[in-house]
Amino acid sequence: MPKLIRLYILQVLAGFGLSAVFVGLLLWANVANLWHLVSTSPVGWIAVAMLFFANGIVFAGVQFAISVMRMGEDDTPAGGKRQPRLVPEPAVLRVPAGEARAQGGTFRRR
């Protein structure tokens, strides 16, 4: 069996395992009175099966996506050339505002 197929099957099993734990915790904690609704209805098992299946698909997809993204190689070099660091320098030429107006600068009143 190819490694990618084996990885996918393992991540799907892990996702559905997480889904079983999640749905079990939802029922145990009685979130939104879910345990009462499921236990008193004759077709409550369908709701539990749908919760398990839908969450299993989501969790399996997330598990597989995380494992595939972690397989990527780091493209950045380990060392070597670094970007030059910009060092702020003080302004050399400062003209007070009064002198700029006296010399006919752009800040004239009309």
Image (tube, helix red, strand yellow):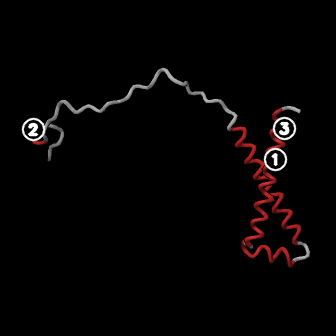
> How far apart, in angstroms, are the residues tagged by discs 1 and 3?
10 Å
Mark 1 lies on residue: 12
The kind of secondary structure element at disc 2 is helix
Q: Which residue, given by chain and number where applicable, does mark 2 sit on? A: 99
The local secondary structure at tag 1 comes to: helix
User: Which numbered disc flags the more N-terminal residue, 1 or 3?
Assistant: 3
In the image: residue 101, left or right of residue 77: left
User: How many C-alpha atoms fall within 10 Å of the one at disc 3: few (<14), some, or many (≥20)?
Assistant: few
Q: Which residue bears the numbered disc 3?
A: 6
Q: Nearer the viewer, mark 2 or mark 1?
A: 1
Which residue is found at the position 76% from the left and 47% from the top? Answer: 61
Residue 12 located left or right of residue 69:
right
Q: Amino acid at mark 2?
A: Glu
* Sequence-first tag of 3 and 2: 3
SS assignment at label 3 = helix
Which residue of the protein is positioned furthest toward the right in this rendering?
Answer: 42
Query: What's under tag 3, amino acid-wise?
Result: Arg
Foreground tag (3 vs 2): 3
Please state which amino acid type lies under the numbered disc 1: Val
Q: Is residue 59 above or below residue 88?
A: below
Tag of residue 69: none
> At x 75% / y 43%, what residue is drawn?
64
